[in-house]
Image: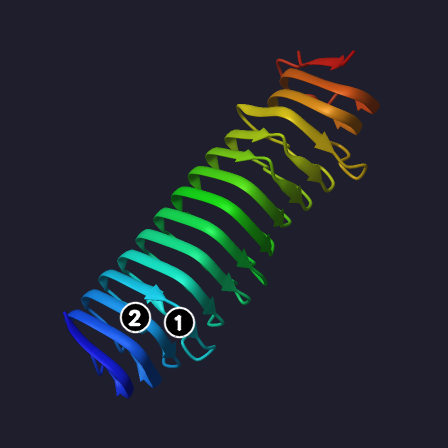
Amino acid sequence: MEKISNCEFGGERPLFGTHGLSLENVTIHAGESALKACRDIEAREVRFEGKYPFWHTDTFSVENCIFTPGARAALWYSKNCRMTNTLVEAPKMFREMDGIHAERVRIPDAQETFWHCRNVRLRDVELANADYLFMHSSDIDIRKYRQDGNYSFQYCRNVEIHDAVINSKDAFWNTENVTVYDSELNGEYLGWHSRGLRLVRCRISGTQPLCYTHGLVLENCTFAEDCDLAFEDSEVDATILSAVTSVKNPRTGRIAAKSFGEIILNDDIQAPADCKIITLD
């Protein structure tokens, strides 16, 4: 593998099409597509300032690097990326990618990040300003994670999340086969129109959660006081270890909770309208 260290590059495509390259203590200045169409790349202590550095790149690692705001849309149409101990200040990262492992990564401007990605593994990752995160992505495994940003995980499939704090209005809309363990989920309208959403030992807050769902499962979760008007038109099997402020027109299934403040069953309820609502002993 060729090694380049203590150098600076800029302009258009300075390392285009390179195979088997190790970069260390390098700066990529303003310009475009520094490592486009490359393969087998290692980047250590590299400062990325130019746009689109990793497009159509196959098998690359990024360690102890910085992507400045000028390095926008840095990782698109690429596969087999491993990123560790890295600060990403650039917006709109990770699009149309297959095979992402990110560990100890911070992304303070994560709006519109992780779109149309597959086979994503995150460990100890923090994201802020993360509106519209993970749109239309699949096969995601997340552990030790914090996110601040709305409309996240919409249209995602095959997701498993552990030990997370997710602050997000409209999270998990139209998802399929998502399981969340031991996490805090804060935000309005959680999980609407989802299929196969399973929440295990989670703390949930925000108005009108978990409506219009199919195959919803809650195992030993707790609800905050602002979780009102829950489960409208939902197919649900829920065990909730706290009080529930209000339940409105669940379609079918079973809801067991410590207590219920209000149970609303009116003419708008959808068939079969046979949900069992049980107070736990």
Q: Which residue appears at 22% of the width and 80% of the height?
A: 4
Q: Which residue appears at 71% of the width and 31% of the height?
A: 222
Q: Nearer the viewer, residue 182 or 254?
A: 182
Residue 219, x across and y down, in percent:
61, 23
Left or right, residue 86 beside residue 182: left
Can residue 75 be seen here? yes
The answer to the question of whether label 2 and label 1 lie on touching residues, with beta carbons closer than 8 A, is yes
Q: Quadrant of residue 271?
A: top right
Image quadrant holding the C terminus, namely top right
| Element at label 1 | loop
Depicted 38 relative to depicted 187: above or below: below
Depicted 276 relative to depicted 75: above or below: above
Can residue 114 be seen here? no
Residue 230, x across and y down, in percent:
71, 31
State which tag comes first along the sequence, 2 or 1: 2
Q: Which residue appears at 37% of the width and 60% of the height?
A: 83
Residue type beneath disc 2: Ala
Residue 225, x across and y down, in percent:
81, 36
- C-alpha separation, residue under disc 2 versus residue under disc 1: 8 Å
Q: In the image, which disc is placed on residue 232?
A: none
Residue 42, x across and y down, in percent:
26, 67
Q: Nearer the viewer, residue 69 or 252?
A: 69
| Element at label 2 | strand
Q: Quadrant of residue 171?
A: top right
**Residue bearing mark 2:** 43
**Residue bearing mark 1:** 65
Left or right, residue 3 beside residue 178: left
Mark 1 burial class by Cα count in 10 Å: few <14, some 14-19, many 20+: many
